[in-house]
């Protein structure tokens, strides 16, 4: 049966065989939909997450998200929400770091404290990268293990 006969018979010929899968939820041939957020707002949200990595160069990690939240809270709701999320994550990491340093001062706790500090650094890098990617795509991200102190 050729294409003309398929159209006339009401039969579904199926997807074209051009090498791309076009249907279903596992469609990998097209990029994910980006929300209607303006690129500028997504960029500010991305910056809020990435700026927290300044802790690795000696600037407290909460400074960047705090500044972005204070400057953009009235004009960009998505960027503001993501900056608050990054700020809460940085405050939580600080609390965990204080606990790890306190454990280092004890003999037995040092066995937990030093690896805890290393783990916190890795957690900060990994989750900040994930959050930055999500924010760049216009998707909200909530960090795990976070005390939501600023709401």
Image: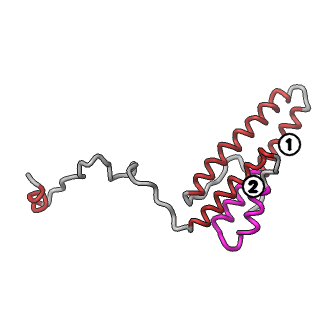
Question: Magenta segment, which residues?
Answer: 63-90
Tell me the CA gap for discs 2 and 1: 15 Å
| Comes first in the chain, label 2 or label 1 | 2
Asked if residue 94 lies in the magenta stretch, the reply is no
Measured along the vertical axis of the image, is residue 103 above or below residue 12?
A: above
Measured along the vertical axis of the image, is residue 88 above or below residue 73?
A: above
Residue shown at the point (75%, 56%) measured from the top left = 87
Query: Helix, strand or loop at disc 2?
Result: helix
**Residue under numbered circle 1:** 98
Main SS class of the magenta portion in the image: helix
| Between 96 and 71, the one nearer to me in the picture | 71
Q: Quadrant of residue 37?
A: bottom right
- Residue 36 location in percent, x, y? 52, 68
| Between 40 and 25, the one nearer to me in the picture | 40
- Residue 1 location in percent, x, y? 8, 51
Relative to residue 12, is residue 114 drawn left or right? right
Query: Helix, strand or loop at disc 1?
Result: helix
The way the protein has been coloured in the rendering is secondary structure
**Residue under numbered circle 2:** 88
Relative to residue 73, is residue 138 drawn left or right? left
Of the 4 image quadrants, the one containing the C terminus is bottom right
Bin the neighbour count of mark 2 within 10 Å (Cα to Cα): few under 14, some 14-19, many 20 and up.
many
- Residue 47 location in percent, x, y? 67, 58
Relative to residue 76, is residue 16 drawn left or right? left
Q: Which residue in the rendered view is the most extreme toward the front?
A: 57
Q: Which residue in the rendered view is the most extreme toward the bottom?
A: 75
- Residue 12 location in percent, x, y? 18, 56
Relative to residue 146, is residue 21 drawn left or right? left
Asked if residue 69 lies in the magenta stretch, the reply is yes
Residue shown at the point (56%, 68%) measured from the top left = 38
Residue shown at the point (73%, 48%) measured from the top left = 53
């Amino acid at each position: 049966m050729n294409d003309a006969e398929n159209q006339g018979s009401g039969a579904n010929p199926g997807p074209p065989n051009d090498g791309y899968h076009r249907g279903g939820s596992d469609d990998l041939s097209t990029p994910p939909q980006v929300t209607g957020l303006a690129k500028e707002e997504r960029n500010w949200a991305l910056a809020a997450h990435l700026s927290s990595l300044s802790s690795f160069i000696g600037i407290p990690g909460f400074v960047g998200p705090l500044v972005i939240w204070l400057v953009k809270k009235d004009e960009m709701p998505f960027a503001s929400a993501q900056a608050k999320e990054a700020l809460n994550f940085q405050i939580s990491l600080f609390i965990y770091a204080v606990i790890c340093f306190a454990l280092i001062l004890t003999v037995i706790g040092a066995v937990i404290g030093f690896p805890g500090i290393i783990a916190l650094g890795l957690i900060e890098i990994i989750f900040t990268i994930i959050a930055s990617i999500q924010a760049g795509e216009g998707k909200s991200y909530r960090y795990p293990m976070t005390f939501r102190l600023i709401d």
